[in-house]
Image (tube, rainbow, N blue to C red):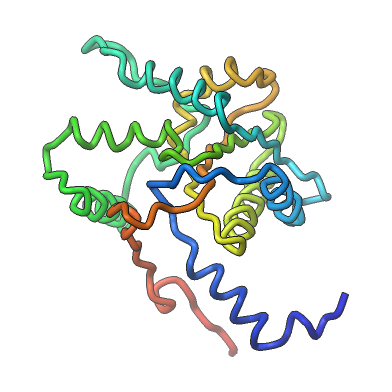
Amino acid sequence: MNKQAFETPSAQQAVDSVILSRRSIRAFLPTPVAQDEIARILEVAARAPSGANMQPWKVYVLSGEARLRLSRRILAAYDAPKAPDAPARTASYTYYPRQWTAPFIERRRKIGLDLYQLLGLERGDTAGMAAQHGRNFQFFDAPVGLIFTIERVLEQGSWLDYGMFLQNIMLAARARGLDTCPQAAFIHYHDIIRDELGIPASEMVVCGMALGYADPDKIENRLSTEREPLAGFVKFMDK
């Protein structure tokens, strides 16, 4: 491998451009993605580092009728009338904090408010918000849906490794002109997902991800999230 090839300004600019242009897309075109291209993205992404080279990731790639069938089953459960005293669906694991604190709660509220304002949903429009959340389970109309699982016996370190794998997928896709949206929403329907995809009990659902080409005409794809300035999370120490 030519080390100098990865030190040129053009290479650095290309990598930076891919990272900076990645966004979570919430409306996709129906344009299909070739299976060979998906396979190459996953092959590249699997170069992510993992402790002891354990490579804890497993991926179920859904398109066509397989994707539609899973979406229909989850949406049927999502839309089903719920008794007032019915317990909430349990997630495959706890993704968000059990107790929200600053600054995380403010960031969460802002992205929700920004998205709903773009969509013309006013505060208190619970039906509209529920419908938008339900779009998750259609993979936002992307032609490809990815479901990620991990073996239950693996510990926190493997979950950290998994995040690097997911990021690699999103960047490899972006470098090819494709877009993605990682989706934790699927973890609340892990039982349906396991049944539909034949996932063994030894695996648990980590998340889903939509993959395809962004629809440039959809207003929700104009959402651009803010990032904390460097001074807010970095401390340089040289003495």
Of residue 159 and residue 28, the one placed in the foreground of this image is 28
40 to the left or right of 193? right
* Vertical arrangement, residue 200 with respect to residue 226, above or below: above
* Vertical arrangement, residue 1 with respect to residue 145, above or below: below
The residue at 59%/90% (across/down) is 239
Residue 58 place in picture, x, y as percent: 70, 36
Of residue 131 and residue 191, the one placed in the foreground of this image is 131
The residue at 26%/32% (across/down) is 130
**Quarter of the image where the N terminus is located:** bottom right
Residue 171 place in picture, x, y as percent: 60, 60
200 to the left or right of 83? right
72 to the left or right of 46? left
The residue at 13%/36% (across/down) is 125
* Vertical arrangement, residue 201 with respect to residue 212, above or below: above
Of residue 8 and residue 33, the one placed in the foreground of this image is 33
Furthest residue toward front: 31
* Vertical arrangement, residue 22 with respect to residue 236, above or below: above
Query: Residue 136 falls in which quadrant of the image?
Result: top left
Residue 231 place in picture, x, y as percent: 41, 79
The residue at 27%/13% (across/down) is 82
Question: How many tags in the picture?
Answer: 0
